[in-house]
Amino acid sequence: MTGGLLAAAFLVAPVAAQAPELAMLDTLTRGSWTLTLREEGTSEQICVRTGREFIQLRHRQPGCEQFVVRDEANVVTVQYTCRGNGYGRTTIRKEGNALVQIRSEGIRAGAPFSIEGEARRTGSC
């Protein structure tokens, strides 16, 4: 009887398939996007291949550790650490496949940064 209870404790029940992490970013239209920063009034071009290019706007180097804080159909938040160069936290809110709102803040090269802006697809890369 004890063996049966022990075996029952280790039964594995089927689990529903989970959506891929940060799936919202995969729905963004690929191509050239213009990011317009609200406070600075400046803009920059970003070639979007996966949507993940928006996560580390002030830390473009590879190899940063990322932790997904929020992962919903229209909003994602990712916190990341880039050893030796700081960290950040970025929230991306999707308004359409070619329009997102972005907020990112953190520390880069020992100095704080905070940016808020809108990115729109403007063409192909």
Image (cartoon, helix red, strand yellow):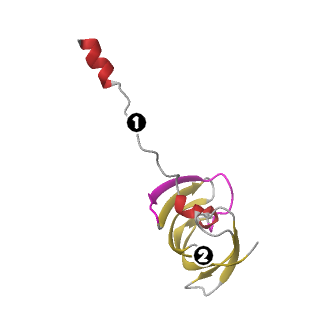
Q: Residue at x 30, y 24 (%)?
A: 9
Check disc 1 and give the amino acid type: Pro
Residue 55 horizontal side relative to residue 123, left or right? left
Q: CA distance from mark 1 to mark 2?
A: 37 Å
Check disc 2 and give the amino acid type: Ala
The vertical placement of 79 against 91, above or below, is: above
- The residue labelled by disc 1 is 14
The quarter of the picture where the C terminus appears is bottom right
The quarter of the picture where the N terminus appears is top left
Q: Position of residue 72 (x, y in %)?
A: 44, 62
Give the numbered dot on residue 121.
none
Quadrant in the picture for residue 111:
bottom right
Give the numbered dot on residue 98.
2
Q: Residue at x 64, y 64 (%)?
A: 53
- Secondary structure at numbered mark 1: loop
Magenta part of the chain: 57-73
The vertical placement of 85 against 101, above or below, is: above
Which comes before the other along the chain, label 1 or label 2? 1
The vertical placement of 5 against 19, above or below, is: above
Taking depth in this image into account, of 36 and 21 the one nearest to the observer is 21
The vertical placement of 37 against 28, above or below, is: below
